[in-house]
Image (cartoon, helix red, strand yellow):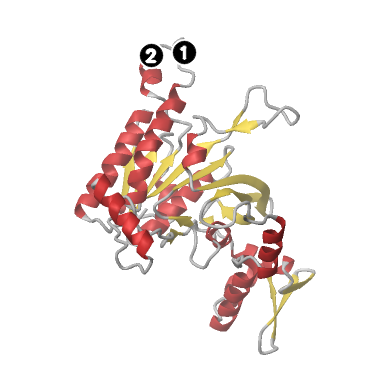
């Protein structure tokens, strides 16, 4: 959300006049220019960045809430840590709210995060979570208003409301957490937008009581509908297949689906490799995608890429990183990925508009 915007420079006189009246009556700049998301933070997967933002150098949008959901061991936490790492690389402040009390120092360092620049907090209750988020935003923005800030909550499902923590095991607290989350999100989402904060919630998928494939969804996320409504982007991650080196399982092929998207076309999917020793590495998945689109030809273990000058590059998928050291090849593959993954926005053809007017004439 833009702040302190002024429409005086606009050429639309009616809009200027109305906005001026509204701001004067309300005593603050409520009416302003509508801005698009200006900055994104990479998820660590180039394919997922495209799927979310539909553009080069995409990722999750700044100034919005993104929710990452999935079952256990599906890659939610790792994806969130990659986002924090890329925040640090952009010179921003990375904040991790660890409600699961499960963060590993060694693993975080192995992913490339700078622990000296990571703000690590362990809130105990839902009330603490929202209070901490509000406090972090206000304190950072007081000193550095333009500073990039990313706050990751891992995870929403793991943190109880205060009454549940302090009460007896027999105490009935059904619905209490959902009410607190709904109230908290209504309060902080305006602040997140106004101050351009990147907020990421990891949330667990749990078996829904009474749910089955015939009567309704088997899986749901806890704490009600508020996170689903307030999130601009929701990404569902799931395990696909195991990656092996010999007899050892060294990683997982992970599938991601953008089940909600307010910044680009929704319901897009992608797959990327997660390795246990280094995190997300989806370069090999680029080739799988380019094969599907027909840009790369495959024959057995070998692949063939025809360059614009007619030269044919033959390679095995495991050697793609070596081939990408050639700047000419890297630039061409980047262009092919743009062609394959960016969905162009087009205006409605004039003939369709004319047809619509004929079917629905305006008197």
- When asked about the image quadrant of residue 111, the answer is bottom left
Q: Which of the two discs, 1 and 2, sits closer to the camera? A: 1
Mark closest to the chain's N terminus, 1 or 2: 2
Q: Residue 167 got which mark?
A: 2
Q: Residue furthest front?
A: 363
Question: In the picture, which quadrant includes the C terminus?
Answer: bottom right
Q: Where in the figure is residue 266, as x and y percent of width and height? A: 60, 53
Q: Nearer the viewer, residue 351 or 315?
A: 351
Q: In the image, what residue occupies the spot 57% across and 74% down? A: 334
Q: Is residue 310 above or below residue 138?
A: below
57 horizontally vs 194: left or right: right
Q: CA distance from mark 1 to mark 2?
A: 9 Å
Q: Is residue 221 above or below residue 94?
A: above
How many marks on residues?
A: 2
What is the secondary structure assignment of the residue under circle 1? loop
Q: Residue 172 got which mark?
A: 1
């Amino acid at each position: 959300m833009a702040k302190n915007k002024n429409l005086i420079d606009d050429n639309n006189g009616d809009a200027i006049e109305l906005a001026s009246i509204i701001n004067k009556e309300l005593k603050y700049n409520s009416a302003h220019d509508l801005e698009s998301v200006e900055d994104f933070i990479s998820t660590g997967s180039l394919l997922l960045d495209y799927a979310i933002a539909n553009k080069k150098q995409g990722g999750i949008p700044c100034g919005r809430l993104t929710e990452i959901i999935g079952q256990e061991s599906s890659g939610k936490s790792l994806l969130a840590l990659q986002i924090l790492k890329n925040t640090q690389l952009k010179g921003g402040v990375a904040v991790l709210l660890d409600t699961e009390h499960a963060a590993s120092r060694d693993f975080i360092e192995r992913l490339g995060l700078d622990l000296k620049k990571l703000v690590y907090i362990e809130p105990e209750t839902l009330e603490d979570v929202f209070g901490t988020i509000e406090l972090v935003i206000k304190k950072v923005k007081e000193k550095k208003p333009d500073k990039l800030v990313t706050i990751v909550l891992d995870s929403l499902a793991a943190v109880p409301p205060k009454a549940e923590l302090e009460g007896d095991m027999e105490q009935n607290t059904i619905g209490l957490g959902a009410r607190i989350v709904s109230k908290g999100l209504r309060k902080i989402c305006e602040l997140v937008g106004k101050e351009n904060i990147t907020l990421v919630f990891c949330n667990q998928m749990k078996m829904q009581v009474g749910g089955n494939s015939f009567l309704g969804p088997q899986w749901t996320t806890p704490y009600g509908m508020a996170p689903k409504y307030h999130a601009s982007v929701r990404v569902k991650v799931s395990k696909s297949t195991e990656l092996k080196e010999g007899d050892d399982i060294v990683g997982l092929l992970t599938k991601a689906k953008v089940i909600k998207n307010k910044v680009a076309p929704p319901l897009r999917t992608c797959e990327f490799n997660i390795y246990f020793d280094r995190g997300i590495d989806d370069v090999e998945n680029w080739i799988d995608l380019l094969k599907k689109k027909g840009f790369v030809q495959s024959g057995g273990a070998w692949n063939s890429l025809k360059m614009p000058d007619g030269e044919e590059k033959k390679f095995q998928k495991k050697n793609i990183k070596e081939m990408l050291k050639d700047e000419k090849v890297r630039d061409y593959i980047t262009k092919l990925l743009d062609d394959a993954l960016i969905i162009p926005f087009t205006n409605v053809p004039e003939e369709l508009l004319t047809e619509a007017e004929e079917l629905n004439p305006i008197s």
